[in-house]
Amino acid sequence: MNNFDAPNGFLDFLSEIPLFFKIFGGLVFTLVVGGFLFVIIRGLKIWLSNNASEIITQKCKVVDKRTEVWGGSGDSSANTNYYITFEFEDHTRKELYVSAKHFGLIVIGDQGELTYQGTRFKEFSRLADSLRLK
């Protein structure tokens, strides 16, 4: 038995797989890796964009709150994202992701000053009743 007759292990296994399965497997692998790269790059882009944005504080009114529940099938637990929509004095609106703690403390109709940076919620300070917008 010479060196050319020795089995090549994994490469020998690959040579026996039909071409269709090689192409299909390569395509699935490419899509999975591409999907992970897309999510990572998109998240990094949003994070960098928020960091480059100035911190803005504006008077506003809370006009809506919503939750987004995902997961929770089988033995896995459900996750909840919390969002609040703020309306500014010029009647433009901005919906921001907030933590559960802030979501529970802010009520629709509250008026105050919102501090945010890009799409990142920083703080909401409620105004006293005598200072509310009309």
Image (cartoon, rainbow, N blue to C red):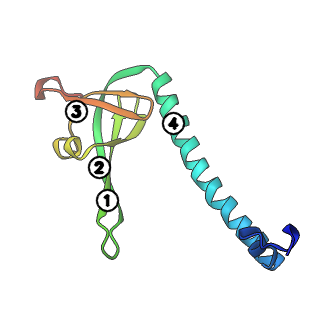
Q: Residue 121 appears at what percent x and percent y?
A: 34, 34
Q: Which mark is residue 46?
A: 4
Q: Which residue is mark 1?
A: 79
Mark 4 is surrounded, within 10 Å at the Cα level, by few (under 14), some (14 to 19) or many (20 or more) other residues, namely some
Residue 107 appears left or right of 63: left
Labels 1 and 2: the sequence-earlier one? 2
Crowd rating for badge 3 (residues with CA inside 10 Å; few <14, some 14–19, many 20+): many
Give the structural element (helix, strand or loop) at label 2.
Answer: strand
Quadrant in which residue 41 is drawn? top right
Mark 3 belongs to which amino acid?
Answer: Gln
- For this rendering, which residue is in front, 41 or 126? 41
Q: Amino acid at mark 1?
A: Asn
* Of the two numbered discs 4 and 3 in the rendering, the one whose residue sits closer to the viewer: 4
Distance of label 2 from label 4 (alpha carbons): 23 Å
Label 4 secondary element: helix
Tags 3 and 2 in contact by the CB under 8 Å rule? no
Mark 1–mark 3 Cα distance, whole angstroms, equals 29 Å
Mark 4 is on which residue type? Ile
Give the mark, 3 or 2, whose residue is nearer the N terminus.
2
The image quadrant that residue 40 belongs to is top right
Residue at (44% x, 19% y) in the render: 54
Answer with mark 4 or mark 3, whichever residue precedes in sequence.
4
Relative vertical location of residue 55 with respect to residue 31 in this rendering, above or below: above
Structural distance between the alpha carbons of marks 4 and 3: 28 Å
- Taking the image as shown, residue 14 lies to the left or right of residue 40, namely right
Q: Is residue 101 above or below residue 18?
A: above
Disc 2: which residue: 65
Q: Nearer the viewer, residue 38 or 129?
A: 38
Q: Which residue is at 35% across, 73% downward?
A: 73
Give the mark nearest the N terminus, 2 or 4: 4
The percent coordinates of residue 110 (x first, y second) are 20, 37
Residue occupying image coordinates x 35% and y 36%? 87
